[in-house]
Amino acid sequence: MISKAFQDIVSQMSEVFPKKFGIADSHGLVLASNGSEPSGDTVDDLVNVAANSDKLLFKDGYTVRTVSNKPYTEYMVYVEGTDEVSKYCCNSLVVAANNVRHYYDEKYDKNNFMQNIIFDNILPFDLHQKARELHVEIDVPRAAYYIKVLDEGENGIYDVLRNMFPDKEKDFVINIDTTNLVLIKELHEGDGSEKLEETAQAIVDTVNAETMLTVCVGVSTVAHNIDRINGAYKEAQIAIEVGKVFDDEKYILNYDSLGIGRLIYQLPIKLCELFLKEVFKKGDISTLDDETILTINKFFENDLNVSETSRQLFVHRNTLVYRLEKIYKLTGLDLRKFDQAIVFKVAMMVYKYLESNSMKI
């Protein structure tokens, strides 16, 4: 275990530094020391001081520093005294402990293993061997949830997710950066799209209730074995990206329900541009004003029903017909004809896709 490796470091460094020092975890449990340990309350105070900072800090006659490059406190080094020797000892111990921690993360940490899978940092022929070494089930169903924070500011979403899914042997929460996280969750046999969306809704609701932040969640299909996890992660990521373009009002985006948006998103940019030029021979879609776009959207929502659309827009039927005629003159497409309406709907989505990223236009 890592505590034994920490104790080996402490024992070796005791021969160099004439100080009392040790390493504790984030819960205040001393994992290794070279002498009498501080009281439990003192260790708790030292952990609280060191939390969320990678700098040398001082408390109750001790020099402390966290041992982690993660967004949360994992281990903490404490050294009795606040003089230059104590500072040097603390920094040296942090470097040594961090090297050990990194080695153990690579070799034994399941969360790190899952992170390497989704980021394609592990070779396919090593995947099953590594899974067996870590006692990670190979043939169990899992799903990937890509959680994107929509609000700015400090957040504690990692802790919220970890509390929601506390089983570290089956559910893995991975920090990508401060606003993007991934959950790889083990499922029960028979869990389908409906169950996956229920979990996504629970994530959205719980995060909002506990942090007052809004998140959207991309949901993958079910990965029935460990070889499919990387693909599931990419599906969840695509669900988020496609949703930002075509369903920006939704907070749960299921890869299984992206419809034609998924197809358009994967088309070559040049092909999309050629399609728009072919469809809009008379004029560009960008010439349509906001009122016209609203009219078009309502017309589609009401299945090309002129009477119902005019009622919902609070305009006379003849006014709506006039607007549709105007659209026909501008674009060459008559939305009252089903086949032309379909072409126009797809063209609007293609334009929105290109417009969503100026690099693509």
Image (cartoon, helix red, strand yellow):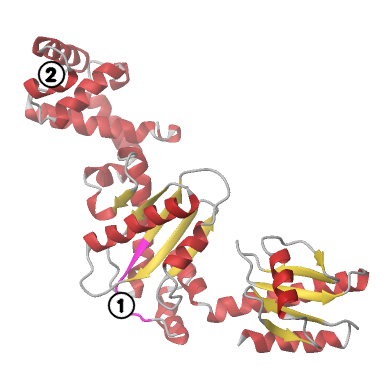
Q: Quadrant of residue 171?
A: bottom left
Q: Position of residue 359 (x, y in %)?
A: 45, 34
Q: Which residue is mark 2?
A: 310
In the rendered image, the vertical position of residue 174 relative to residue 214, given as above or below: below
**Residue 155 appears anywhere in the view:** yes
Q: Which residues are magenta?
A: 137-144
Please rate how many residues cluster around mark 1, counting C-alpha atoms within 10 Å: few if below 14, some from 14 to 19, many from 20.
some
Residue situated in front as seen by the camera: 19 or 99: 19
Q: Which residue is mark 1?
A: 140
In the rendered image, the vertical position of residue 339 relative to residue 128, given as above or below: above
Residue type at tag 2: Ser
Q: Position of residue 221 (x, y in %)?
A: 27, 61
Determine if the magenta segment contains residue 184. Answer: no
Q: Position of residue 331 (x, y in %)?
A: 21, 18
In the rendered image, the vertical position of residue 199 relative to residue 358, given as above or below: below
Residue situated in front as seen by the camera: 7 or 208: 208
